[in-house]
Image: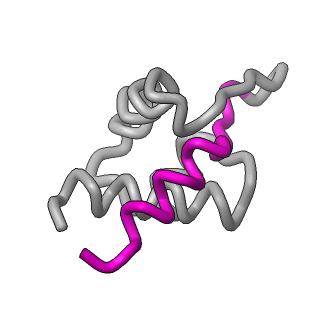
Amino acid sequence: MSARNSLKIRVLRALEKHGWLRPRELHTRAGFPLRSSPWTYMKRQERWGLVRKRVVSGIGPEWTITRRGRDRLVWLQRPK
């Protein structure tokens, strides 16, 4: 499995397990290598329809997994 898919699996699993997560929570739960990387990475996942973002007043952005993201997670985890 590529490093790119490994991170995607960790992120989607964390969102599936914990629901809505903020960037700092994603950093610790999914193991991002850099503190700023969740922002850019999650924007890309949002464009692909794997996650959904909401902005909570006073807190900032949070993301959760979408149905398409769950389907992708199943596909990524199936035996090759």
* Start-end of magenta stretch: 60-80
What residue occupies the far front of the structure in this picture?
Answer: 80
Decide: is 6 above or below 49: below
Of the 4 image quadrants, the one containing the N terminus is: bottom left
Number of marks in the rendered image: 0
Q: Is residue 33 left or right of residue 61?
A: left
In the figure, is residue 53 to the left or right of 46?
right
Render colour scheme: one colour
For this rendering, which residue is in front, 13 or 77?
77
Residue 14 is left or right of residue 18, and the answer is left
Q: Is residue 74 above or below residue 23?
A: below
20 shown above or below 43: below
Give the residue displayed 15% in from the left and 60% down from the top. Answer: 2
Look at the image and say whether residue 18 sits in the magenta stretch.
no
Position in image of residue 50 (x %, y %): 53, 38
Residue found at the very far bottom of the displayed protein: 79
Choose top left, top right, bottom left or bottom right for residue 75: bottom left
Residue 55 at what x, y percent from top left?
74, 22
Classify the position of the C terminus by image quarter.
Answer: bottom left
In the picture as drawn, the residue positioned furthest to the right comes out as: 57
x, y percent for residue 44: 39, 27
**Residue occupying the point 57% across, 62% down:** 14
Closest to the observer: 70 or 29? 70
Classify residue 13 as left or right of residue 20: left
